[in-house]
Amino acid sequence: MDDDAFERQHRQNVRKSMEESAAGLRLRREPRSDIPEEHQAEFRAWRAQEDQRISDERAGRETQKTFAEMNPIELAFAMASYSPAQYPAALEAVITERVAAVPAQKLDAEGTDALLEVLSLQEQLRGDHPAMWMMDRLQELTSHPSATVSVKAFAVYFEIQDEIARERERRG
């Protein structure tokens, strides 16, 4: 993949992540009950702030903040207030600007090797004979300095943990 294609794919992935966050907020008016109360209070405050912003916008009043002044969480709540096809031009411009501002992480040779190791462990763990050392190594890779490697290692680790739990449940 050439650098231009890599950058395009990166921007698409960032945009998709932002859209998924907004979609989740569209579906959930209240915070999940399993998160700490202080985070639930923050969620409710952001929701109330966005509800007030929408009310002001619909009444033709000036809003407290422009889209450009919003932090990423406030922006996600704003995105959730519209369907993606109906974003105001100012919101779409800020989304496009923020997507372009997220740097693509390029792996060095050591990072590439570590990511390949995670993927190899994932395949081996899905096989018939997963070994404990593989899970231990995955856990070590969750502390890798590259976010790409550590996030993938966490995802694989939890995926395999879930599979192990389902297998134990099935066996009784």
Image (cartoon, rainbow, N blue to C red):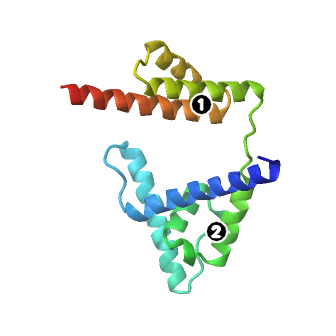
| Residue 142 visible, this angle | no
Residue 158, image x, y percentages: 44, 32
> Do we see residue 53 in this rendering?
yes
In the picture as drawn, the residue positioned furthest to the bottom comes out as: 60
Q: Secondary structure at mark 1?
A: helix
- Is 53 or 80 nearer to us in this picture? 80
**Percent x, y of residue 38:** 40, 45
The residue under label 2 is 67
Return the x and y of residue 83 as percentages of the image width and height: 50, 73
Q: Which residue is mark 1?
A: 150
Tell me where residue 116 sits by quadrant: top right
Which residue of the protein is positioned furthest toward the right in this rendering?
3
111 shown above or below 23: above
CA separation, marks 2 and 1?
A: 32 Å
Residue occupying the point 51% across, 28% down: 123
Q: Is residue 149 above or below residue 85?
A: above
* Amino acid of disc 2: Phe
**From what the image shows, is residue 138 above or below residue 43?**
above
